[in-house]
């Protein structure tokens, strides 16, 4: 019984790992793009600002679910026999030590971002924001992990998908750097000057 | 009804009560030390700056386990433009406020006291400075007076801490909580002047004597004798209206000032002016402002004026507050000046839900609470408003 069904189970788990990995890449790209949009306070007719923030948050949660699926199916797959340690300790896997380790790091960075967001009321916005900047590290590390160890990495469809993701985030980052001016900067400075009671030298 | 405890003593028009008169009337503040925290907790006294937080619980949180000496900040900034009670109290009964400050400092085992006073409140400033110089206690003689800018958010407790510490009256985000790291990184108690004056009496006469306590009310609007009244906690809106010389043609009441809510007159008359009872009804006594809107006044225009003021008082720390309140104020005044239109009504409803809870501080939440109460109480006027502008003269000062 076990023997007969094992090949099928192996295949299901293996396909799930690969599929969930690809879906995570697409979702994470969208989350990073939306995060950059909301840092720019982007809005347009038909796209109110809360939509960016709401999508960013909800897609981030979905991403974590797919990422969890990706990791769990990879670990429990009897064929690869990775073990749970590889999912937690970077570069501890016997199998593709370096490329898989990058995935572990990316997942842990994203977990840190998720946990600090839930605990924002306790840790304060400053710490939260610093940890949130780690997204700029987690995303490229995840992309490299996908290209380095992905079974489908060099198949045409996955390669095109990866290129599209890189182009999207790249464009968003360049755009962010280009329009770094905070629309609140001037009124904020004016108010600050109006309530500044430090002794004048 | 009118019940003078804090305001008992010489007539208010005679200016600051001297230390001699104060001591003769009430005697020196008792030496209780940290045991006072228990007494205050049992009295059930709540903070009178607007949040109605239990005073005893706040003190206990600060007294618990810090190695560093805390700072006691006496908050007389009174940023609410319609409120007068803090300046009246500081001007007429400075020693009662200072008694409260010294009792708080000794309960928290500290010698550090700062008194924050709104810089436009000249009489209060003069009275408190003179009173500090009269006091024998070294903690009070060394107390700092800090002048707060005349801005709405300058009286908010984190802004007061920021001002007393670094000289800039900006609200800050939390954590760290000021109970742990406030002025100069020390645990900090920010307490409204009225709360401290109540403490001065509770320390003398006991928690049982306090009972339901009294509240200082600033009655404004359609009354012939607007001003500050001290009434027993639980006194009805109607009784305050009559005591302030009101006539019958009032249609709505703004309870709790600009951070409060509109209530239709029919529902408001029998409401008890008690911080806890009002909170249980989803309302707030806030800093004690009770505004009466005359029958000839317009709820829409009045709300538009207040929203414009609150938007102009945003400190521009975050988008929901700076952009959100401005958009809400603009939509409200469009209805006021050009008449009702469906788009703006839909926008007000949607935006007010979106802005709530998204600010870095509570400023947008307070403004939205006021607006939503107006949309409910003046629903008919918002739906059928003719183009006109009928609001009381305003005092807002725009910065940008």
Image: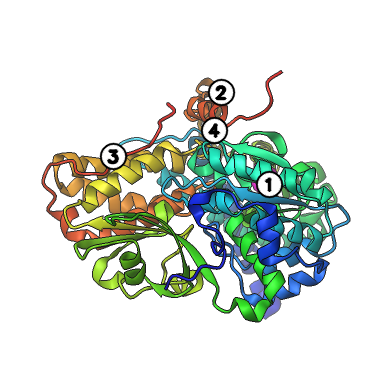
Numbered circle sitting on residue B332: none
Earlier in the chain: of badge 2 and badge 4, it is: 4
Residue at 47 percent across and 46 percent down: it is A53
User: SS at mark 2?
Assistant: helix
Spatial CA distance of label 2 from label 4 is: 12 Å
Spatial CA distance of label 1 from label 3 is: 35 Å
Q: Using the image as rendered, state which of residue A138 and residue B387 is in the foreground.
A: B387
In the drawing, does residue B21 fall left or right of residue B367? right
The correct choice, above or below, for A123 with respect to B197 in the image is: above
Q: Quadrant of residue B102?
A: bottom right
The correct choice, above or below, for B390 with respect to B52 in the image is: above
Residue that badge 3 annotates: B393
Q: Using the image as rendered, state which of residue B324 and residue B57 is in the foreground.
A: B57
Numbered disc in front, either 1 or 2: 1
Residue that badge 1 annotates: B131
CB atoms at circles 1 and 3 under 8 Å apart?
Answer: no
Spatial CA distance of label 1 from label 4 is: 64 Å
Residue A144 at x, y percent in the picture: 68, 37
Residue that badge 4 annotates: A169
Residue that badge 2 annotates: A177
User: SS at mark 3?
Assistant: loop
Q: Is residue B177 visible?
A: no
């Amino acid at each position: 019984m076990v023997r007969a069904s094992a090949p099928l189970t192996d295949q299901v788990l293996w396909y799930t790992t690969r599929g969930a990995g690809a879906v995570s890449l697409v979702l994470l790209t969208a989350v990073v793009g939306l995060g950059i949009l909301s840092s720019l306070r982007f809005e347009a007719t038909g796209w109110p600002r809360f939509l960016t923030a709401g999508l960013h948050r909800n897609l981030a949660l979905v991403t974590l679910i797919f990422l969890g699926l990706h990791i769990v199916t990879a670990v429990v797959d009897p064929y690869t026999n990775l073990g749970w340690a590889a999912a937690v300790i970077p570069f501890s896997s016997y199998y593709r030590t370096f490329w898989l380790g990058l995935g572990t790091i990316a997942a842990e960075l994203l977990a840190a971002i998720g946990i600090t967001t839930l605990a924002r009321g306790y840790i304060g916005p400053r710490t939260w924001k610093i940890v949130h900047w780690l997204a700029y590290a987690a995303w490229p590390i995840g992309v490299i992990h996908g290209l380095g160890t992905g079974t489908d990495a060099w198949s045409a469809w996955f390669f095109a998908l990866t290129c599209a993701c890189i182009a999207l985030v790249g464009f968003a980052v360049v755009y962010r750097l280009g329009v770094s001016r905070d629309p609140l900067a001037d009124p904020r400075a004016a108010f600050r000057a109006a309530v500044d009671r430090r002794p004048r030298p | 009804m009118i019940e003078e405890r804090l305001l008992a003593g010489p007539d208010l028009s005679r200016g600051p009560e001297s230390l001699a008169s104060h001591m003769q009337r009430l005697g020196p503040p008792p030496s209780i030390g940290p045991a006072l925290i228990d007494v205050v907790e049992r009295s059930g006294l709540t903070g009178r700056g607007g949040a109605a937080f239990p005073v005893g619980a706040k003190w206990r949180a600060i007294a618990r386990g810090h190695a560093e000496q805390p700072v006691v900040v006496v908050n007389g900034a009174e940023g609410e433009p319609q409120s007068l009670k803090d300046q009246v109290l500081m001007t007429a009964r400075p020693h009662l406020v200072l008694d409260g400050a010294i009792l708080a400092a000794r309960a928290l085992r500290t010698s550090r006291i700062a008194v924050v006073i709104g810089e436009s409140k000249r009489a209060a400033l003069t009275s408190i400075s003179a009173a500090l110089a009269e006091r024998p206690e070294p903690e009070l003689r060394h107390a700092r007076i800090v002048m707060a800018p005349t801005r709405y958010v300058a009286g908010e407790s984190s802004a007061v801490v920021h001002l007393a510490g670094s000289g800039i009256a900006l609200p800050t985000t939390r954590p760290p909580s000021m109970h742990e790291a406030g002025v100069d990184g020390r645990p900090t108690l920010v307490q409204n002047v009225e709360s401290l004056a109540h403490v001065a009496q509770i320390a003398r006469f006991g928690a049982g004597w306090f009972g339901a306590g009294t509240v200082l009310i600033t009655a404004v609007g359609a009354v012939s004798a607007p001003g500050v009244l001290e009434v027993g906690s639980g006194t009805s809106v109607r009784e305050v209206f009559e005591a302030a010389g009101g006539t019958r043609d009032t249609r709505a009441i703004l309870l709790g000032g600009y951070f409060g809510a509109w209530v239709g007159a029919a529902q408001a008359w029998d409401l008890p002016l008690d911080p806890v009872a009002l909170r249980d009804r989803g309302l707030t006594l806030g800093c004690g402002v009770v505004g009466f809107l005359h029958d000839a006044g317009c709820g829409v225009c009045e709300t538009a004026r207040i929203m414009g003021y609150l938007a102009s008082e945003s400190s521009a720390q975050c988008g929901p507050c700076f952009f959100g309140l401005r958009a809400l104020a603009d939509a409200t005044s469009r209805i006021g000046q050009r008449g009702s239109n469906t788009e703006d009504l839909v926008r007000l409803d949607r935006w007010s839900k979106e802005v709530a809870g998204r600010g870095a501080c509570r400023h947008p939440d307070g403004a939205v609470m006021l607006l939503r109460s107006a949309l409910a109480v003046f629903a008919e006027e918002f739906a059928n408003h003719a183009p006109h502008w009928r609001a009381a003269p305003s005092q807002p000062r725009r910065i940008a």
